Amino acid sequence: MKIGIGLPNQVRDVNPAIIPTWAQRAERAGFSTLGTIGRIAYPGVMDTVALAAAAGATSTIGLTTNILLATVWPGKLLAKELAGIDGVSGGRLTVGIGLGGRPDDFVVDGLGSRGLGKRLDADLADYRELWTGQPVGGGDNPGVPAGSREVPLLIGGMAPASFTRMAKWGVGYIAGGGAASDVAGFFEQARAAWQEAGRPGQPRLVALAYFALGRPDEGRAKLHDYYSIMGDYADHVAAGMSGDTDAVRATIAAFAEIGADELILSPGTADIDDVERLAEIAL
């Protein structure tokens, strides 16, 4: 199982200037991937901006949105932005997407928080059209440079339609923050949907967990703050955060046991020394 690390882009009031340095240190430490979480109505750095900065500051480490709230963007605009990040990085981007649902994140006129499944299905078709160089905007021009690729998609969600969508459009399934015991059933549904759709091999299975090693109490408080709009789930996430060596190793073992291909450990604080602390434990 590969081990990635999150960028601190959605730690409350993070100093955005830390993101390129964090990315460079993560690459030197040997993590497989840099991940992001994100929402609009929160004082952090947009996922796409954080990954663009990381792409420019690194050369080998993977880049993943974990998870991007795809429906808060107009589909074609997001597709072009993601293609640009992928191109700048030399083809290192994988896009993990979900529906979202917190009403305050939907700030674009005409893109509210209802009808998200149908909208995402339409957006996925728009992504493919743009990424394969088809004309956009009613003219003759494609939206991406020649040689652009279809950016690999990991699709998350818990509803049955999410797994059907994953098997049609994605290279695999991505789980949100939660214990391995919570995620195991979703992985099984992903495998079943993949087989039912007649896809060869197995879906790529990626999971997210949280950690804070230098300042664990602060990490739990910040995670609780981030998820506070979701009620009791905030308690669940904060309690499940790994705050010491034993907890990190137990989390890694648990996700390996359920068959995760990659685990991205996302930071609860912007303490940059946590990059090396985590590497010493996890790699």
Image (tube, helix red, strand yellow):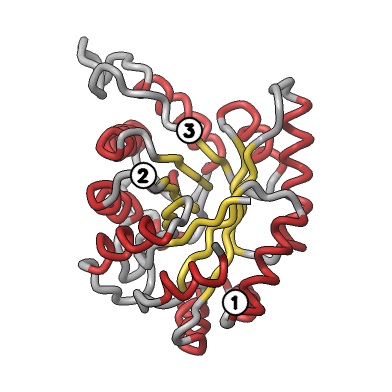
Question: Does label 3 or label 1 sit earlier along the sequence?
Answer: 3
Q: Which mark is residue 189?
A: none
Question: Does label 2 or label 3 sit earlier along the sequence?
Answer: 2
Q: Which mark is residue 60?
A: 2
Question: Does label 1 or label 2 sit earlier along the sequence?
Answer: 2
Whole-number angstrom distance, CA of label 3 to CA of label 1: 29 Å
Q: Which amino acid type corresponds to the residue marked 1 in the rendered image?
A: Ser
Q: Which amino acid type corresponds to the residue marked 3 in the rendered image?
A: Pro
Of discs 3 and 1, which sits in the foreground? 1
Q: Which amino acid type corresponds to the residue marked 2 in the rendered image?
A: Thr
Residue beneath the point at 53% across and 47% down: 98
* Res 148 → quadrant: top left
Residue ID for mark 1: 242
- In front of the other: 271 or 197: 271
Q: Residue furthest bottom?
A: 217
Q: Which mark is residue 152?
A: 3
Asked whether the beta carbons under mark 1 and mark 2 sit within 8 Å of each other, the answer is no
- Where residue 262 appears, x then y in whole percent? 59, 50
